Image (cartoon, rainbow, N blue to C red):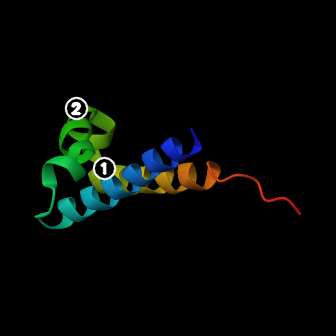
Amino acid sequence: MRKTVQFAGFVMILQGVSGAIDHLAVQPFFGIVLNLFNRVVVPRVSLLSEYPLFANLTLAFLGVIVVIAAEPPKRS
C-alpha cells in the first residue's frame, strides 16, 4: 500500500512539472500521459483555468507531500 501511494505521488510530481513545462513551452515527450492533468482537468475547472501554471506547480508540490507522507516513520 505504501509503495502505491508513493507511486501516485511520483506521478503527481511528474504531471505537475510536465504541465508547468507545457504551459511555458511545448512538451514534446509523453504529452498525452504526462499532461493529462494540464489538458483535461485544468480547462474544465474555472478556477484552475485562470491560473494554469499555479495549478500545475501546486499538483507537483502536493505530489512531494504525498511521497514524504508515505515514508515510514524512522525509529530511533
On the image, which quarter does residue 36 sit in? top left
Q: Position of residue 22 (x, y in %)?
A: 18, 60
Q: Position of residue 25 (x, y in %)?
A: 14, 67
The crowding category of the residue bearing disc 1, from other C-alpha atoms within 10 Å (few below 14, some 14 to 19, many at least 20), is few
- Indicate the amino acid at tag 2: Arg
- Indicate the amino acid at tag 1: Tyr
Q: CA distance from mark 2 to mark 1?
A: 12 Å
Q: Position of residue 2 (x, y in %)?
A: 58, 44
Q: Disc 1 on helix, strand or loop? A: loop
- Left or right, residue 18 beside residue 74: left
| Quadrant (top left/top right/bottom left/bottom right) for the C terminus | bottom right
Task: Please tell me which residue is depicted at 23% across the width and 47% down the height of the picture.
Answer: 38
* Tally of marks: 2
> Which dot marks residue 42?
none
Q: Nearer the viewer, residue 57 or 36?
A: 36
Residue picked out by circle 2: 44
- Left or right, residue 76 beside residue 39: right
| Quadrant (top left/top right/bottom left/bottom right) for the N terminus | top right
Q: Nearer the viewer, residue 39 or 8?
A: 8
Q: Disc 2 on helix, strand or loop? A: helix
Q: Depth-wise, is mark 2 or mark 1 nearer the camera?
A: 2
Task: Please tell me which residue is depicted at 49% across the width and 42% down the height of the picture.
Answer: 4
The crowding category of the residue bearing disc 2, from other C-alpha atoms within 10 Å (few below 14, some 14 to 19, many at least 20), is few
Residue picked out by circle 1: 51
Q: Earlier in the sequence, mark 2 or mark 1?
A: 2
Q: Nearer the viewer, residue 72 or 23?
A: 72
